[in-house]
Amino acid sequence: MEINDTTSINRSTSNLKILPIIARRVSGKIWKHPKKATHRSQLARGLRKSWNERLKERNEKQALKMLEKELKDEKEAEKKRKLDAALKRKQALEEKERQEKLAAIYSAKKLKRLQKKQGKRK
């Protein structure tokens, strides 16, 4: 009595059930049920919207977002402009105070010579 190895392999594989491969969720939450596509025909008549209506709503929402972004950018630019102007005023005031201190220390002619030297250095 010889045992045929191929028949034993065939018998063992026929007893196995082939399980369907389930796609894993990216988040790793395997206990969550996979979402299915929305069937608009199953919605109530009052809730259904045609493609044109949905497209119109989408375009209106996009236009509103663009307007909000434009207003936000404009407000940010105004804020930045005010900050720059305040910084320039502060720098001019500091420079003026520095010049006044120098004028108090030096005579007018010596101050002109120092300013001339600084102009050449720049």
Image: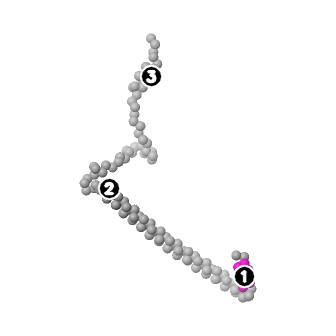
Magenta stretch mostly in which secondary structure? helix
- Tell me: 46 left or right of 66: left
User: Residue 45 bears which disc, if any?
Assistant: none
**Residue at coordinates 29% horizontally, 56% vertically from top-left?**
49
- The answer for how far apart the CA atoms under marks 2 and 1 are is 75 Å
Q: Read off the residue under disc 2.
A: 51
Q: Percent x, y for residue 44?
A: 25, 53
Residue 93 location, quadrant:
bottom right
Task: Out of 118 and 63, give the one closest to the viewer.
Answer: 63
Which badge, 2 or 3, is on the more N-terminal residue?
A: 3
Q: Percent x, y for residue 116?
A: 72, 82
Q: Percent x, y for residue 12?
A: 42, 24
Of badges 3 and 1, nearer the viewer stands: 1
Q: Amino acid at mark 1?
A: Lys
- Tell me: 38 left or right of 2: left
Q: Read off the residue under disc 3.
A: 9
Q: Read off the residue under disc 1.
A: 116
Q: Which residues are drawn in magenta?
A: 112-120
